[in-house]
Image (tube, rainbow, N blue to C red):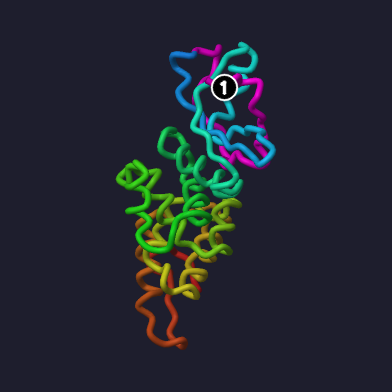
Amino acid sequence: DIPAQDVKLAPERFQFRTTKSEAVFGEWRTDLAGDFLLWRDKSGQLYVIDGHHRLPLAQKAGAKIKGIVLDEAQVSARDAMGEGALRNIVTSPDVDPVDIARMLKAWAPKGDVKEYLTAAGVGTTMQRTKLGVALAKLPDGAFDMVRAGEVDLPAAAAIANELSQFPAQLMKAMQRAAERQAAGTPMSGPEATSFARQLRSVTSSSETVTEAGMFGIET
């Protein structure tokens, strides 16, 4: 057991989530606390990686905590943050799909992302995970549009699923989706899928795709 007072909080360095948890944290209860994920630097200082909301309660109660400790000698601070992000996705049902995508873009190995998540114990059939996996396929510029709220998640995910191998068409679809959203008529997921498939079918740069019939917007 580790005295909670011996562990430091450094959310600006180790807390990956950008959205607040919906979980309610009241008084410290050892029987419900679970294990913490901690990282120890070369000086011996411990930092919390997963458990940022629980640690202050344990410290206030003067409690000891149980933790899995990662050492800097084996795990860098950045990789420790990645371990914490993945663990958070496994244990927290309210992690935002955008944060899932951020984690995958930063730490998932190239290849089968679903296999990576499954190996970690993340259910890949859940809607939040499906959205996160799709959004992770977006190039940075398109992903920034999602983070800025310019394109709704279902539309962005549909575009990513259809056009991840066609970056020029993908950005055109994202820009059109952003225009629709700014005009107050956001694309639905099915609409985005249909438009993306039209773009993908274009075989010549001289060809154009219009939305006149389907979306009521001229190109």
For label 1, the SS is: strand
x, y (%) of residue 119?
A: 33, 47
Is residue 190 visible in the rendered image? The answer is: yes
Rendered location of residue 45, percent (x, y): 67, 33
Of 28 and 201, nearer the camera is 28
* Residue in the picture at 58% in, 14% down: 63
Residue type at mark 1 is: Ile
Where is residue 157 shown, x and y percent of the image?
42, 56
Quadrant of residue 163 within the rendered picture:
bottom left
Residue, x 35% and y 65% (percent of image)?
194
Left or right for 93, reference 175:
left
Which residues are drawn in magenta? 1-29
Report if residue 10 lies within the magenta region. yes
- The one of 173 and 26 positioned closer to us in this rendering: 26
Is 86 in the magenta? no
- The foreground one among 181 and 168 is 168
Query: Does 182 appear above or below 17?
Result: below
Q: Which residue is mark 1?
A: 2
Above or below 92: residue 153: below
Label 1 CA crowd tier, 10 Å (few <14, some 14–19, many 20+): few
Q: Would you say 43 lies left or right of 106 here?
A: right
What is the quadrant of residue 94 in the picture?
top left
Residue at the outermost left position: 125
- Which SS does the magenta portion mostly show? loop
Residue 188 is situated, as x and y percent measured from the top left of the image, at: 41, 54
Q: Residue at x 38, y 55 (%)?
A: 189
Q: Can residue 185 be seen by looking at this rendering?
A: no
